[in-house]
Amino acid sequence: MYDPVNHPVHYTSSPAHCECGARIECIQITEHLGFCIGNAIKYLWRADMKNGVQDLRKAEWYIRREIERREVTSQPEQLPTEDYPSQNR
């Protein structure tokens, strides 16, 4: 069943699969990252399935914003040190 809110095609059409064969969705990766890095990956992930160059430019914008933030603060965003439970969606 098509679900454009919870599982939009441009997020679930990736050929990426985990070892068990289940499809990997973009949110499963990006929800563990900082905002700008996560958004950049989201736009890169879907560029060939949705808006092409426009999504690549959006990814570039988020990457530049993150670079500027890090240059000002000299501190990269840190991921939490605890392990994340596997998520079967």
Image (cartoon, rainbow, N blue to C red):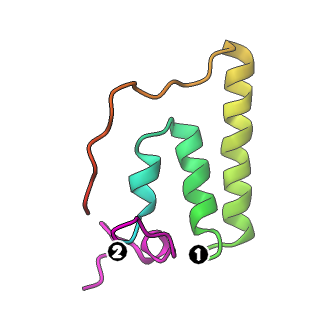
Quarter of the C terminus within the rendering = bottom left
Q: Secondary structure at mark 2?
A: loop
Q: Which residues are magenta?
A: 1-21
Relative placement, left or right, of 21 versus 46 is left
Disc 1 residue crowd, few under 14, some 14–19, many 20+, Cα 10 Å? some
Q: Which residue is found at the position 58% from the left and 41% from the top?
A: 37
* Amino acid type at mark 2: Pro
Outermost front residue: 19
Q: Which mark is residue 50?
A: 1
Image coords of residue 59 (percent x, y): 67, 52
Disc 2 residue crowd, few under 14, some 14–19, many 20+, Cα 10 Å? few
Image coords of residue 24 (percent x, y): 41, 65
User: Which residue is nearer to you in this view: 78 or 4?
Assistant: 78
**Residue 63, relative to residue 13: is it above or below?**
above
Q: Which residue is found at the position 71% from the left and 46% from the top?
A: 61
Determine the main secondary structure of the stretch shown in magenta.
Answer: loop
Q: Secondary structure at mark 1?
A: loop
Image coords of residue 23 (percent x, y): 39, 71
Image coords of residue 1 (percent x, y): 24, 85
Relative placement, left or right, of 87 versus 35 is left
Q: Which residue is found at the position 39% from the left and 72% from the top?
A: 8
Residue 58 is a magenta residue: no
Relative placement, left or right, of 40 versus 3 is right
* Amino acid type at mark 1: Lys
The quadrant holding residue 27 is bottom left
The quadrant holding residue 68 is top right
> Contact (CB < 8 A) between labels 2 and 1?
no
First along the sequence among labels 2 and 1? 2
User: Which residue is nearer to you in this view: 24 or 47?
Assistant: 24
Q: Which mark is residue 4?
A: 2
